[in-house]
Image (cartoon, grey):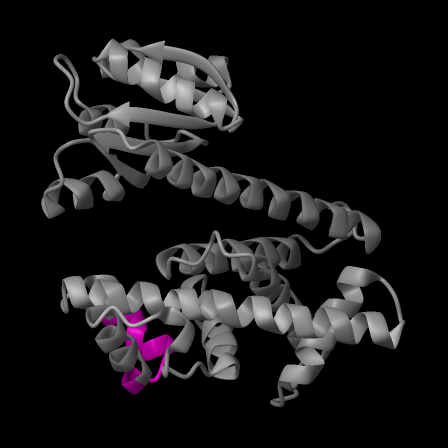
Amino acid sequence: MRFFIVDDDPAIRSMLAQIIEDADLGVICGEAEDGMNIDLDFLEWKRVDILLIDLLMPKRDGIETVRELRGFNGKMVMISQIETKEMIAEAYSYGIEYYVTKPINRLEVISVLKKVKERLLLEQSIEGIQRSLQVLSGHTPAQASKKDAESESNLLSSTKFLLTELGMISENGSKDLLAIMDSLHQWEKENAGDNRFPSMKEIFIRVATLKLNTTDESQINKEVKAAEQRVRRAIYQALTHLASLGLTDYNNPKFETYAATFFDFVEVRKRMMELESKTDSTISTARINTKKFLFVLYFESKSRIGL
């Protein structure tokens, strides 16, 4: 992974570079002291994967720089000692993935960069899986229907957007959810006109069979149980994320849009109360309806792209 650091303080740049190298997160491919010194072509030439950029700089600040970097294919992390909600919201609206506060905390930096790195690797992995599935199924771009190929790609992109909105894209279970969305899409095409959808058991068995490429029942059952646990943990993370947003701002657009759509609001409220009282998450009383979440995610992903 290739990192580029933009900060007008050489001590901060040195500290961040040291943390990244010591934690074996990747390599530093360059540094700059102001946003004026970088643009899209420069970052592409440097093959930058993750850009760390300071908010306050003398010539062109972080917000303005990020605005100018629309179209950047990598990930961006904002660094600043300013933590106003308005400033953070503006940074996120322009594509910032995470926010690191000053003074720099080594553990916080490592935790944030690991999450960003995992998200980037996950997206790259999904793209690779999609290409591999096309080859393995014998459907090359020339053979497959252009409309079908586009709809599958758009559906997964729509799902990834929703998983990101729900704060769960970096969870291991997100890979399983994407595979389930693809499987449901395939099932719907194969059973056109059938109003019945597969049961939860059928869904997980189908995905596990495709993943393992085997008919061994013991292996499939083992993978099904593991996948169910990963999915439940990912969904629980989404519940916690939305509950946290609701506690901070009950009128938060994401909270208003997704909380009651993906979950029973009684359970969301339970999780909010647990967070407020700092209850141990391992003993949460909030219940998760996996089936509801899966089908809501599928239909929401479809509706976003007009399928």
Residue 205: horizontal and vertical position, in percent?
74, 76
Q: Is residue 253 left or right of residue 73?
A: left
Q: Is residue 271 left or right of residue 250?
A: right
- Of residue 144 and residue 243, the one placed in the foreground of this image is 243
Residue 172: horizontal and vertical position, in percent?
56, 57
Which quadrant holds the N terminus?
Answer: top right
Disc tally is 0
Identify whether 197 is placed above or below 298. Answer: below
Is 294 contained in the magenta span?
A: no
Residue 40 visible, this orientation: no
- For the point 46% across and 39% down, the residue is 114
Q: Which quadrant holds residue 110?
A: top left
Q: Which quadrant holds residue 304?
A: bottom left
- For the point 37% across and 83% down, the residue is 285
Residue 241: horizontal and vertical position, in percent?
32, 63
Identify whether 74 is placed above or below 174. Answer: above
Magenta region, main secondary structure: helix
- Of residue 70 and residue 204, the one placed in the foreground of this image is 204
Q: Is residue 106 left or right of residue 134?
A: left
Residue 199 visible, this orientation: yes
- Of residue 218 and residue 145, the one placed in the foreground of this image is 218
Identify whether 275 is placed above or below 270. Answer: above
Q: Which residues are magenta?
A: 256-266
Residue 101: horizontal and vertical position, in percent?
22, 35
- Of residue 239 and residue 123, the one placed in the foreground of this image is 239
Q: Is residue 123 left or right of residue 213?
A: left
- For the point 52% across and 75% down, the residue is 294
